[in-house]
Image: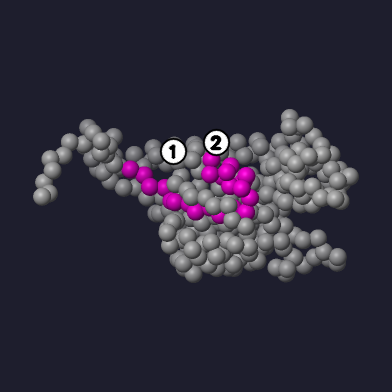
């Protein structure tokens, strides 16, 4: 077995596909290919699988991810059409194409996993969402936000990476933050972001990862968080929520029902509170300055 190999865990019935991140004397550190899961496992519990092999659970996640992306594109197109209809009559018919420009909410995405961050930034680009991403260890996220928030000035902050309920010698307590791998670090980052901007509608915070302490993350100031049912969430679930906030008009609130229904992990993976969108319309449409003929007037 080598670094980068795809494996499944025999003891879990091979339900999730992992990639080998590190090999130790008695075991390996493995990372989910579809889900935000970082785990360790004995070497004799791992079964190598070919790249073409997809578990039933992974296949379902891929199908749901494609459906969610298709819905985002469709909603984006419908929104542009509605914007044009709403502005009809504001300008003369001959100038209708130059009536307005769109300003989606800007995203700052901090991710504890570099490969998931890369996938997330690729999706933001596909959706034409302005986004800046940083790979930051979960324990350093609060300090990083304190430093870069004044520079980036985002509308939406995504705080994610790896989390999970820790294996305990005795029964775990889901109310206790000490039962979680990184929920405390996410909470510290949320509090830093809320110190920067207290208004929930001026800064939307999407936080958490697999099995995160949902209630504590909301209590710290997140608008949306994982995971109400303490389940594994899909790698792109936080991106979907951020995209919904980015493309929802400032006149409207993000449709909670759509978020719960259309995220890959569903209502047990992501939840939140009513939040106003970050999308704005500007007028008139921005011009191509390279083609603009101007007579200089300044001395």
Query: In the figure, 174 relative to 104: above or below?
Result: below
Picture coordinates of residue 38 (x, y %)?
A: 72, 51
Q: Secondary structure at mark 1?
A: helix
Q: Secondary structure at mark 2?
A: helix
Q: Residue at the location (39% across, 39% down)?
A: 80
Q: Residue at the location (47% across, 60% down)?
A: 148
Picture coordinates of residue 210 (x, y %)?
A: 69, 54
Q: Residue 243 vs residue 169: left or right?
A: left
Name the front one of labels 2 and 1: 2
Is residue 28 in the magenta section? no
Q: Characterize the local packing of mark 1: few (<14), some (14-19) or many (20 or more) Cα atoms within 10 angstroms.
A: few
Picture coordinates of residue 198 (x, y %)?
A: 47, 68
Q: Characterize the local packing of mark 2: few (<14), some (14-19) or many (20 or more) Cα atoms within 10 angstroms.
A: few
Of residues 163 and 294, the one drawn nearer to the viewer in this rendering? 294
- Locate residue 52: give its quadrant: top right
Query: In the figure, 160 relative to 123: above or below?
Result: below
- Farthest-out residue, right: 44
Q: Which mark is residue 70?
A: 2
Picture coordinates of residue 284 (x, y %)?
A: 26, 43
Q: Residue 42 vs residue 20: left or right?
A: right
Q: Which residues are magenta?
A: 101-122
Mark with earlier residue (2, 1): 2
Is residue 108 in the magenta section? yes
**C-alpha span from label 2 to label 1:** 12 Å
Q: Which mark is residue 190?
A: none
Residue at image mark 1: 78
Q: Residue at the location (44% across, 56% down)?
A: 152
Q: Is residue 182 visible?
A: yes
Q: Is residue 221 visible?
A: no
């Amino acid at each position: 077995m080598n670094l980068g190999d795809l494996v499944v865990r025999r003891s879990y019935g091979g339900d999730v596909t992992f990639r080998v991140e590190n090999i130790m004397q008695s075991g390996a550190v493995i990372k989910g290919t579809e889900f935000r899961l970082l785990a360790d496992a004995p070497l004799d519990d791992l079964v190598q699988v070919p790249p073409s092999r997809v578990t039933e659970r992974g296949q379902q996640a891929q199908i749901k991810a494609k459906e969610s992306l298709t819905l985002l594109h469709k909603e984006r197109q419908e929104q542009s059409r509605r914007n044009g209809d709403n502005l009809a009559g504001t300008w003369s018919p001959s100038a209708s194409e130059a009536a307005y420009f769109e300003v989606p909410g800007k995203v700052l995405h901090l991710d504890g996993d570099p490969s998931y961050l890369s996938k997330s930034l690729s999706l933001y680009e596909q959706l034409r969402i302005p986004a800046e991403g940083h790979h930051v260890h979960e324990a350093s996220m609060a300090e990083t936000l304190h430093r870069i928030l004044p520079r980036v000035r985002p509308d939406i902050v995504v705080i994610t990476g790896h989390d999970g309920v820790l294996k305990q010698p005795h029964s775990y307590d889901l109310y206790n933050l000490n039962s979680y791998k990184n929920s405390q670090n996410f909470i510290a980052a949320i509090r830093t972001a809320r110190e920067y901007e207290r208004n929930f509608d001026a800064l939307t915070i999407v936080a958490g990862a697999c099995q995160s302490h949902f209630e504590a993350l909301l209590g710290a100031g997140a608008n949306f968080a994982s995971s109400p049912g303490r389940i594994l969430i899909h790698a792109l679930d936080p991106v979907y929520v951020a995209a919904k906030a980015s493309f929802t008009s400032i006149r409207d609130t993000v449709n909670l029902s759509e978020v719960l229904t259309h995220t890959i992990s569903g209502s047990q993976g992501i939840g939140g509170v009513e939040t106003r969108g970050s999308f704005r319309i500007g007028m008139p449409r921005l011009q191509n300055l390279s083609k603009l003929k101007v007579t200089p007037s300044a001395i």
